[in-house]
Amino acid sequence: MLFLFVLVINMLKTHNECLLPFLIHLDSLQPSLQAGTGATNMELDKLRNLKGLREEAGLSQTELANQLGIQQAQVSRYESNPESISFNLAIKWIEICGKVSNSHHLNINTIPREGLLQELHLSLGFIDGAPRISHPDISASLGLLREALVRLGRKPIIGVYGAFDAGKSTLLNSLLGKDTLTTSYQPTTSLACLIRSIKDKPNWQSENVWVMDKNFDPSRSTNEAYCRAHLLLAGSYGSLKDYTTHDGSEASKISENAGIVLVYVDSPILDVADFLDTPGFGNSGSDDDANAKNSIRIVDAMIYISTVDGFMKNEDVANISGLLKEVPPVEGQPFSNLFIVATKSHTVPKNELNSIIQKASARTYKTLRSALDNRYIGYEKSSDSNGETSVNRITSMDIEDQFRARFFTFSVEDVSLSVNFENTLSDFLCDTQPDCSKTQYEATLKAAKETLTGDSLKWISALERTRDDIENVRAEAARMKADLPTRLQSFRDKETKGSGLIDSYKATGRIKVQEIYSTVTAVDAIEKLIERSFNDKKEAQKLAVTMVQSELVERVEVSIKKCSRDFSQQVDEMLKDFAYELNLSLGVDSGSRLFNIQAAFAGALGGVGALGALAAWSAIAAAGSNLGGYILVAQVAGWLGISSLVGGSGTVMAAVSALGGPITIAIAGAVLAGFAVASLFGPSWQRRLAKAIEKALRNANVESRLVQGSDDYWDQTKTAFCAAMQKTAKNYEEKVKEREKEAFSTSPEQIKNLIDQAKESLGFFKSMPLGWAKT
């Protein structure tokens, strides 16, 4: 009887007869009969609510009709009477709107983030209610404080990376609890998709999908004029298939100019984070690798996925080595924002999974040990407990343990294999990240209150001196004006001197890169590295080339960073000497009216683009309390695209990557593409393997790539230095004009009003609430 029943069902399916009335009532029949149709309870529920399916997918009736190949009126009729739709059309309806497989939501605790947002709302309300402050520096500092707090309050961006067929979109759809993103075992995602909560969609944006051009800055996604200027296409979720996948019929029309896609989705996990679905690595004949590499610059945490079959193969390890350079460290917990996930874990026996994870984590750490140790050893965690500060240094053993703990299993088909990953991700999003934001929020507010209160006191003092000693103040202003041409020439001289210094570092950098390349890639050196690191011939053949490449890039990186620190000290000394020279003309009684060239130069760096070695100077200078360290750390972090995961200036410095992730990944890809070794049988296999690696490095032009990377770094430094020095000179010129105006054009009554204003400013900053911070 069951056989005949199933046969009838299959015949009806084949002939596209109307099965819906039968299927809708099927759940009242015996479960065994229901199973024979292949229809699950979830599918039956969907068939009963065709309108709900469409609305959840964000499609209009017309859009769905176009994809189904029918009229809009037919869609309306089927939604009103689901029993009238044919089986095949219903299945297509479900497929278009998105099939939810094993849908479940993470346990997301939004309370910590809600607390942060409440504090942020109160603080921004306080700042926006500030009295009129005509002092340009104090006003600018207050604006920078606002920017810093907004940055601390934003959600972290979690980037998802991996090979094109590893299952990134499938994993994301599982986390989101819905099939919004196109999934396939083909290289579908061709553009990076930044997925945000529907609650964050601006009121002026009606569509759920916006495709933006390559020059779009995601941090400005709430600026309507900016967004519309960079918009290429606005549409529904259906647009993702047409415009962001390789098989999309319209993709070629915009692919050349498209940079990132903004996608707004209703999902609980998006209340605490944004996600970036990236193009897959390894899709030959496309720009996916370049798009994936460049997108890493905006992420705060990374999920790297690799299929359990061949988990973390050589190409994956090479990709990770570059990506890690761009992911900011978390203060005190450097790997808590890293997740390396074995997808499709249900395809191997469960009793083999632990061995797969352990071997892959050991293999990856072994290959990247030099890079990981150089970045994190000596990295300090400070904790304030009962008024006492303790400092813990991270050791090599700590690094290995913490790094290897970031490997996980995942499966949509067997959700039990995803529990550890999802719980750890939830802990990071709901505890670790909000705690980092809270710590930085407290430090920022406390330092801001101290700095702005002090600046207001200095302002009052300067105004009172102008009131009480106007003749000397006017003499100083006149002296500054007369001396201005000489001082502006001094700025040009310092710019020339700094440019020459940078040129010398560039030349030295080229020599050092060449020396490092010659040392590391010598066949004898590679052979010794293989003998020291590998006993197993097969393992060496798989990993040695990536280990050598990683060692080479890391040594160059360390060398450039050392030069950057040396350069930073020279720049700092140059600025201090110049500050003395500039302020000498002001007279010994100038007090608080001295021109702070270091602060002015640091402020001038904002907006000049890539900073090169000046990022290192900024991180070091940020520690100086006389610069208002809280402001400068916020500025530097903003320039580098670093989130609130990064703590003080030391962590900012750790986040600075000289060569950068994209060039590192490009070098690794070129080396692996040209690497081949015919046979390792017999004695001296280490020597033969070493020769093959040296040849691959030579054929991939790695030396010239590294030299070019070093040159670009110092060229960026020179461009930033010259632009900042010119802006600082302009700032100084404006200060001289302000001093002249105040001394000669400000009446006693105006001075009195300014003093009243400065005192109101002082009272305002003294009353600044510290929120979480101790008062």
Image (tube, rainbow, N blue to C red):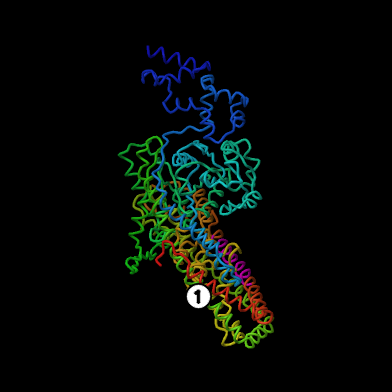
> Of residues 209 and 261, which is closer to you in this image?
209
Measuring 39% from the left and 64% from the top, which residue is drawn there?
Answer: 379
- Asked if residue 281 shows in the view, the reply is no
Residue 678 image offset from top left, x and y in percent: 45, 46
Image quarter where the N terminus lies is: top left
- Asked if residue 81 shows in the view, the reply is yes
Residue 622 image offset from top left, x and y in percent: 49, 70
Q: Quadrant of residue 244?
A: top right
The answer to whether 110 is drawn above or below residue 23 in the figure is below
The answer to whether 47 is drawn above or below residue 148 in the figure is above
> Of residues 670 and 13, which is closer to you in this image?
13
Image quarter where the C terminus lies is: bottom left
The answer to whether 737 is drawn above or below residue 674 in the figure is below
Residue 75 image offset from top left, x and y in percent: 58, 25
The answer to whether 772 is drawn above or below residue 227 in the figure is below
Instruction: Answer whether residue 723 is magenta in the image.
Output: yes
Q: Quadrant of residue 381?
A: bottom left
Instruction: Answer whether residue 476 is magenta in the image.
Output: no
Tag 1 residue:
454
> Of residues 751 and 495, which is closer to you in this image?
751
Principal secondary structure, stretch drawn in magenta = helix
Residue 65 image offset from top left, x and y in percent: 60, 28
Neighbourhood count class around disc 1 (C-alpha, 10 Å): few under 14, some 14–19, many 20 upward: some
Query: For the residue labelled by badge 1, is the local secondary structure a helix, a strand or a loop?
Result: helix
Measuring 52% from the left and 22% from the top, which residue is drawn there?
Answer: 82
- Kind of residue at badge 1: Gly
> 19 left or right of 389?
right
Q: Give the range drawn in magenta.
A: 706-725
Direction front: furthest residue: 749
